[in-house]
């Protein structure tokens, strides 16, 4: 087979998937843990998706960079259940890193591949109306939770051909800003937009579960198994907000949710355009476990 014919066949194989997802929204959480790596193929995938009328909405993190900057400034870093304790100084640093640096880097990368991108934090246009996070055992300071997503604003941008790139900060009606976990923001956005797919990229190839002394990445997991695995400590740390975000998005009507390795080349296209997909698919209780 000639190289040209092979290329044509690859494109044709993608056709049913492109048709299936045409016009649909895919929310992509871009994990901070992968940002030091070469992520050019990840960015290219976003641009290609948009080009074939699949609409990505990006919510990004940046936890490790916030931590690095705080440490270099001699500010104490403290997490409680995966959430950063956020006083005024930490809020300002988080805002500088997430909005000032990372958000603009992603937007300019997308544009460098010919895509149209708009960077927003949840503060802009009250995209993420937030309140102080409720029911925490200790006071986390200015850590927020999403009350409302301004879907009208997002849909307008999507329809104008933009890929919205969202930094995980929110604001209340009094103008108080909040730092919000990016997985949580992504779940709220995916849920409110009734996204077809919700993909979380991180620095592991999926969810590891140990069975009979062997630790393997599982291709699918349901709510029951998730609860059991959090209880017995198999799912811990930063993976907890991720699986909770998947379940939240599913409960709000998102069709499928996936945890994938953002360091794997073209992971978004592999997830979207192949039958088997990659990483771990998270499902509701009544489905596969
Ligand atoms: N069962 C599990 N399977 C995979 N990763 C897990 C599991 N339990 C905990 N983790 C941890 O979750 C981390 C991903 O979360 P996090 O560091 O917050 O990433 P991100 O910055 O991409 O949001 C992994 O690097 C891993 O250390
Ligand atoms: C409240 C809270 O913890 N906010 C996070 C926001 C960034 C984030 O979630 O980044 P990752 O997705 O890379 O972990 C933080 O300050 O680190």
Image: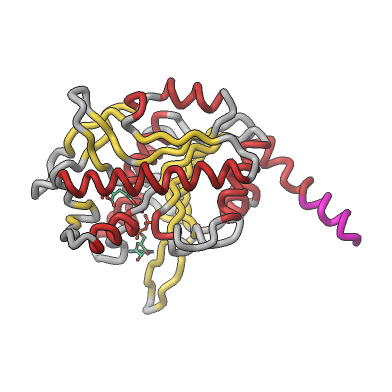
Residue at x-position 64% and y-position 33%: 53
Residue at x-position 20% and y-position 55%: 81
Looking at the rendering, which quadrant does residue 33 occupy?
bottom left
Residue range (magenta):
1-10
**Along the line of sight, the residue nearer the viewer: 139 or 97:** 97
Task: Return the x and y of residue 45 as percentages of the image width and height.
Answer: 61, 48
Residue at x-position 49% and y-position 60%: 261
Report how many numbered discs are placed on residues in the image.
0
Main SS of the magenta segment?
Answer: helix
Depicted 62 relative to depicted 233: above or below: above
Q: Could you tell me if residue 277 is visible in this image?
A: no
Side (left or right) of 11 relative to 31: right
Q: Could you tell me if residue 122 is visible in this image?
A: yes
Task: Return the x and y of residue 243 as percentages of the image width and height.
Answer: 35, 51
Depicted 222 relative to depicted 152: above or below: below
Residue 4 is one of the magenta-drawn residues:
yes
The colour scheme is secondary structure
Residue at x-position 91% and y-position 60%: 2
Ligand 1 is located in which of the four quadrants?
Answer: bottom left
**Along the line of sight, the residue nearer the viewer: 195 or 143:** 143
Q: Residue furthest left?
A: 138
Task: Return the x and y of residue 238 as percentages of the image width and height.
Answer: 31, 58
Task: Return the x and y of residue 199 as percentages of the image width and height.
Answer: 48, 47
Q: Residue furthest bottom?
A: 213
**Along the line of sight, the residue nearer the viewer: 181 or 199:** 181
Residue 31 is one of the magenta-drawn residues:
no
Side (left or right) of 175 relative to 110: left
């Amino acid at each position: 087979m000639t190289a040209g014919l092979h290329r044509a066949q690859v494109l044709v194989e993608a056709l049913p998937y492109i048709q299936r997802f045409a016009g649909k929204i895919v929310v992509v959480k871009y994990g901070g843990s992968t940002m030091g790596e070469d992520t050019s193929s990840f960015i290219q995938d976003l641009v290609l998706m948009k080009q074939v009328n699949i609409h990505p909405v990006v919510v990004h993190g940046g936890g490790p960079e916030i931590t690095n900057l705080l440490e270099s400034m001699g500010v104490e870093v403290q997490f409680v259940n995966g959430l950063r304790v956020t006083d005024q100084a930490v809020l300002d640093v988080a805002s500088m890193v997430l909005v000032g640096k990372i958000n603009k880097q992603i937007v300019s990368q997308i544009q460098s591949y010919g895509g149209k991108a708009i960077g927003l934090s949840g503060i802009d246009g009250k995209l993420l109306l937030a309140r102080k996070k409720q029911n925490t055992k200790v006071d986390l300071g200015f850590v927020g939770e999403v009350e409302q997503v301004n879907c009208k604003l997002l849909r307008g941008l999507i329809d104008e051909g933009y890929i919205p790139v969202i930094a995980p900060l929110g604001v209340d009606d009094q103008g108080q800003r909040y730092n919000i976990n990016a997985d949580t923001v992504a779940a709220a956005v995916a849920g409110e937009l009734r996204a077809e797919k919700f993909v979380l990229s991180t620095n592991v190839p999926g969810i590891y579960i140990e069975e009979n002394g062997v630790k393997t990445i599982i291709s699918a997991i349901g709510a029951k198994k998730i609860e059991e695995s959090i209880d017995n400590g198999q799912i811990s740390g930063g993976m907890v907000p991720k699986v909770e975000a998947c379940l939240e998005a599913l409960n709000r009507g998102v069709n499928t949710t996936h945890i994938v390795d953002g360091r794997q080349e073209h992971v978004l296209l592999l997830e979207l355009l192949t039958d088997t997909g990659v990483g771990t698919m998270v499902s509701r209780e009544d489905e596969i476990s």
